[in-house]
Image (tube, rainbow, N blue to C red):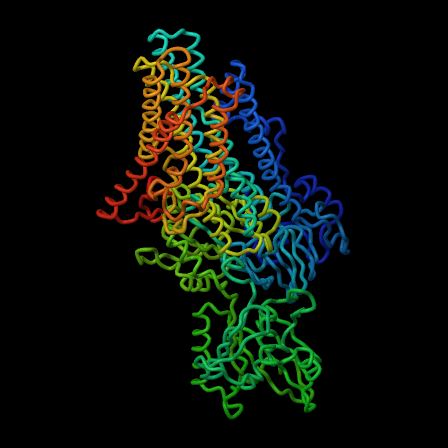
Amino acid sequence: MTMPIWHTLSAEDAAAVLQTDILQGLSTAEAAERIARHGPNALPQAKPGSVIALIARQFASLMVGLLVAAAGVALALGDWVEAVAILVVILLNAVIGFATEWKAASALAALRGQAVTTAQVLRDGAAHEIATQDLVPGDVVVLAAGDRVPADGRLIRDVQLQLDESALTGESLPVTKSAAVLVDAQALPGDRTNMVHMGTAVTDGRGRCIITGTGAETEMGRIGALIDGVAAHGTPLEAKLAELSRALLVIVLALCAVITLLGWLRGNELLFMVEVGISLAIAAVPEGLLAVTTMTLAVGMQRMARMGALVRSLPAVEALGSTTVICTDKTGTLTRNEMTVRAYALGALRVDVTGTGYTAKGSFQIDGRDIDPARLGLALRIGALCNDATVDRSGDAVSILGDPTEAALIIAAGKAGLDRDTLHTDYPRIREMPFNSESRLMVTVHTAPNGGTVAYVKGAPGMVLAASATVMGDGGEIPMTDEALQQARAANESLAAGALRVLALAHRALPDGFEDADLTRGLTFVGLVGMIDPLRDEVGATIARCIEAGIRVVMITGDQQATAAEIGRQLGLDTDRQGRPLLAVHGSALADLDDAGWRKIAGGTSVFARVSPEHKLKIVEALQHSGQVVAMTGDGVNDAPALRQADIGIAMGIRGTEVAKEASAMVITDDNFATIVSAVEQGRVIVHNILRFIHYLFSCNFAEIITVGAAIMIGWPLPLGVMQILWLNLVTDIFPAMALALEPSAPDVMRRPPRDPAEPLMTRAFGWLIVWQGCLLAGCTLAAFAIGMRWYGVEGEGLRHAVTIAFMTLAMAQMFHAFSARSRSRSALSSRLFTNGWLWGATGVCLALQIAAVEVPLLREVLRTVALSWADWGVVAAGALTPVMVVELVKLVTGWRSRANPSPVMRFGSGRKAASPARLP
């Protein structure tokens, strides 16, 4: 059965379809029959996954499988230290993953918490208070200020009814509701002014509605289904680590099998070579990779927390660093969420108002010069008195009760020294006509200090001008001529073009025995006032920083298209980096798009206005299908599906609903766009640090394999013992890698484009870098081993001495190689040499442990080493420092060539390839 389009039906027709009586409501018997048919008015609960399944999922990674196998081999060989260390890493990652997924699964529970518990309903002709879960379609519900709407409904009566729908639609201001029929069948939820929706709040007035949908059939229920329908997906890091693990598994098994076979063919005992091959396999599997990755992400989370960004999921930190598009809300994120008067238009005069927010500090200016605000006295007084808002300054922060636009008028009067309480004393209110959707005016009647009666009026410019017979001129009231009318309309268009919300101000001295009709006719037009939720001071520079970093910013807002487009223009979002115009699109234009259409419009649009939750979700999906890594901000229930779908969902901590917070991967505590961009910078630092320690770990592990494999192929004795390989894996691998994970941000990290999301962690260029540097480390180690064999022989204690030289050379070379791994292009000897104190500390610890390995008798016995002479140490030093010098020389030559043949920087996000990781630090 096709559902009626409720907002296009009259109240009577809607009642007829629902078979209910507008005046009497349903009968108790009919309500009982309907609840049996439709079920309770509650959001459907998803069946929670079992704890066992959630735990098991933490061990499904291929990298975890490799580590479990390595731990099993180590245990079989009797190396319980290595086995325990690997198992601790696995368990730590499982605990973190379990906690993260458990919290993320609570989004639907938070959504259910948005529902109210009781409602006023008409049944059998009388008002009753019932549990909201007992509401059924056809119930007539009574709404009053302060109520939350218990289900979706069609208004049948309204008296100055206003609702806060920001959690559902993103509209920042209260929405005036009317029971009048709407003709646009395609109207979005935010434009259906005769409908009310579950979970929204009544801010003013009262009304009645017929319930049209309950539970899953409401807008909120539909959003809940969207959240539940968004499949869980891994972050780019998780996918790339899985890809790397698969490649590593094949390479490790192949290399170790070849080395074992070659060693046996060269005359070594088969069991001994099997043990060596297994040891190399353990060494080749970078158990440090998972541990250091976890630690890097955790440290990044702590850094972000200190700047006001609370990350709820470890892998989300990396996703931030790879972000290519930020989809952001406007209100409170790009703006201050504090309505502020910006200008008054009095006749041909425009007066600008300085100061921002809810502090009464500012001045009144004409052409940049301060003027006496007394010239605006009447306009300021009308705005302050024709007003129901309250500005409370009793606490530490200013709080606003009522309509933010009215609060802005009170603040503007305060900037001129007008005190609201004093005005009320001098002009006591004796009567009022509240704003309604038909007249679009608000009128208050006051007793003036001279004993007369005056009406103060504010409202929509068109309505106020139509009701005005005269206009306030320099010398007093003059007739409203066509010229004056055109001047006022031009001023209105000028203010509105600057994305200001415009109200008209008027007054009238009322005659004795005045009638209601006198309040809205024969008015004297005083002027216009334009106000705006101002942009945050830092947001312009922050967006410019995003553009410089190759990150595209898309604004998604509940505002009207014209306002949104102008804000986008002010922010520089109306063109791309090449100056090509970008679109501002209304949600109604997105109704019938296919997948190709969505990708096209998402790629060429910078501002989306009046969009639905499905639209937000589709925008994110279209960008992702185009290869983008998407960060999505949001605060309302309507944002939750898109927040969950995005690679990194970002909820607002101050005004965000619990639904949005639970569906997101990160919460911004100050609701500031600049904090998001700072978090992206930290994410980039983390991505670069992950690449640094991958570079370091893999080149070191590859060096160990090549050292043993090359020696076997040459026909030499093994240059490293089994315990020495394990020692290298535990000591010289882990500590410097952890220090690299703490590398501070480079000054130009936000002047580079983001990584290409399609690019694997191990690119061909990166892999070649690891191979030749690993071979370089191995070559220097084998050279030192050859010298040791030449000096001390190839048997007995002489061979043990040569092996010790090789072991120490490789260990020291790996330590120094960590400094080269800090950057693939910048010299290790640059001004940033001492910026990472952790690396120097790790080097000191490793150096002390390596010296202990040849000086402490117990370690000498375990590792099969001997004490070294000064000549031996000279060989070790030469072999360890040579790779650093070669790598730095290659950087120097490569840098010269790059400067001699500069290539244009490719920006990702505009359809072109991003910079290669080889150019990242």
Residue at 45% across / 50% down in the picture? Answer: 326
Residue 455 image point, x, y percent? 63, 82
**Residue at the extreme left:** 900
**Residue at the extreme bottom:** 475
- Quadrant assignment, res 540: bottom left
In the rendered image, is residue 626 in sight? no
Q: Dividing the image into 4 quarters, which one contains the C terminus?
A: top left
Residue 30 image point, x, y percent? 72, 45
Residue 397 image point, x, y percent? 64, 65
In the rendered image, is residue 390 in sight? yes
Q: Dividing the image into 4 quarters, which one contains the N terminus?
A: top right
User: How many numbered discs sit on the rendered protein?
Assistant: 0
- Quadrant assignment, res 270: top left
Apparent side of residue 707 relative to residue 513 in the rendered image (left or right)? left
Residue 621 image point, x, y percent? 44, 43
Q: Nearer the viewer, residue 261 or 178?
A: 261
Q: Looking at the image, is 176 positioned above or below residue 910?
A: below
Q: Looking at the image, is 142 positioned above or below residue 79?
A: below
**Residue at the extreme front:** 870
Q: Nearer the viewer, residue 283 or 590?
A: 283
